[in-house]
Amino acid sequence: MRLNDVHYLMPVLILVAGAIVTMLSVAVKRNHRVVFGLTLLAHFAALFTLLPLRGFSYQIPPFLIVDGWGVFTMGLILMTSLFVTLVSYAYFEQREERKEEYYILLLLATLGTCVLVISQHFMALFLGLEVLSVSLYALISYLRLREMSDEAGIKYLILAAMSSAFMLFGMALMYAVTGTMSFTDIAVYLRSMQDIPLLFLTGFGLIVVGVGFKLGVVPFHMWAPDVYEGAPAPVTAFIATASKGGMMGLLIRFITETDGYRYPSLVLIFTCIALASMVAGNLLALRQKNIKRLLAYSSIAHLGYLLIAFLAGNQLGVEAVSFYLVAYFITTLGSFGVVALLSDNIRDADQLEDYRGLFWRRPATAAIFTAMLLSLAGIPLTAGFVGKFYILASGVNTQQWLLVAMLVLNSVIGLYYYIKVIAVMFAQPEKKPELRKVLHPAVSFASGATMAVLALLLVWIGVYPTTLVQIIRGLLVTFMASR
Amino acid sequence: MTTLPMEYGLLLAGILFVIGLVSLLIRRNIIFMLISVEIMLNAAGLAFIVAGARWAQADGQVMFIFIVTMAAAEVSVGLALILQLYHNLKTLDSDAANLMYG
């Protein structure tokens, strides 16, 4: 390892150090506030060292590559994890269980996702994916006294392990055919072949199963509603954003590197997945009475939208994916942040009835939740609208008319169930809600401030998207130039 | 010395993988489901070793060691979860662990 490698890997190394220091501090003395502070510090330090890495493309052969795309996705994931941490403090403060280990696991999950998006070799990919997955098993079942949490954890564990096995078998087949595990060398091998060998195609299919599972797209989506419902709300936010975004980042790197768009069979597979996800996600969301399950199905549909931009494959497509990821992350974090904010120490506020008349009880929270839902639906003046518009543009640009038409149709269906939740929030409450033990205002200050920042970002990007577009374009220069 | 063609090894790994998958789908006891997943992971490991042997590289074996390590980590978390689940439900039948319809 050269000295320069350390410079380029600093964000990842800081996350490792952060996890270890946090663990040691828990061993010395359990203090929620100290651990929270250390976690925040690790995030800020990692983000700070990420900043000077813009505009370079640095290889750490054979495993990792830090380029514009890697820096963009790493920054996005670190910001997400930062917001999740901020929301978690108030959420866990009101629970009796031991809360300090949560932050260690969160740091490790973030570390895994960061390694995932900068990997250019199957080994690094596998390592990042498993660090992420194993931390997630523990995070999902963190509130271990809740039966639903345990159930969600074991379901995720069995299914994630199965999908890892699929992915590994696919990698093994690819390795057997090509004799290399690095993306670049696989691309070299593919260029030398007229058509893809059958064994390689089988391997790719198996990898798609693994990737599809992590992305939670139809037909690999069965785990999503249960895990979303059973996991603690901040963890759900993390799964819906960072874990899916990391996988999307990896997928884009792999397909762009190997120039997978040349093969109609691969494009066909992803087209079918995108169509099925959009339709099934939106239709199944219609009948949900549980907010977390509703958001789970909605996120399945959103990943379907995202795949349209992914299928476009050109510069515009990657830009659209980046923009949509930002918009989707902000809205999803905001929505689950509201759920976490309203939860008490017995259960999460996930029933639709918990939100009846919310506007008359907590106008600010209801307003933020409304903004988030409108953004998910893609109403103008929110980030979700601009993101959807970007995807539409990339789809039209590559003449994928079927996908574009389905996107428009599904947005209309989606509007129905988002508006339904908003209507419930504005309805007059039927009875006086029983008074709950209210936390000290200072405790929930971090959550409240985070929500406000997210709402501001949402509107800002929705009204004036130019800044974000410029940032994304600037970062993607080093990624697209090498193609 | 004659060597076996690579396809035989891959076929064996594929059969093991399918056995693991089928038993995962038909078993209802969570411990057995965990074991089935282990079989699938080890089948993938075997495929890596076969592929590594074909190219005379150490990469396949390195990957196998990674897989074994990861499987151990997974099982330790999994068994802890199963203990907790048994504590709550007094059974290891996966149909009983179905509070959320899914």
Image (cartoon, coloured by chain):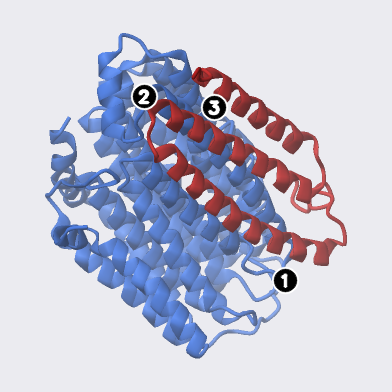
Chain colours: A blue, B red
- Residue that mark 3 sits on: A276
Residue A412 visible here: no
Mark 3 or 2, nearer chain start: 2
Q: Can residue A237 be seen here?
A: yes
Judged from the image, the secondary structure of the residue bearing numbered disc 1 is loop
To which residue does mark 1 refer? Answer: A145
- Give the amino acid at mark 1: Leu
Q: Which chain does tag 1 point to?
A: A
Q: What is the C-alpha distance between the residues marked 3 and 2?
A: 32 Å
Residue at 14% over, 59% down: A4
In the image, is residue A448 above or below residue A241?
below
Measured as percent of width and height from the top left, residue B96 is found at: 84, 51
In this view, the residue in front, B6 or A390, is: B6
Return the x and y of residue A149 as percentages of the image width and height: 68, 61
Same chain for mark 3 and mark 2? The answer is yes
List x then y, in percent, for residue B30: 77, 49
The residues tagged by marks 1 and 3 sit, at their Cα atoms, a distance apart of 36 Å
Q: Mark 3: which secondary structure?
A: helix
Separation (CA) of disc 1 from disc 2: 48 Å
Q: Image point 36% across, 63% down: which residue? A: A454
Decide which of tag 1 and tag 2 comes sooner along the chain. Answer: 1
Amino acid type for the residue under numbered disc 3: Ala
**Residue A77 position within the rendered picture, expressed as x and y whole percent measured from the top left:** 35, 56
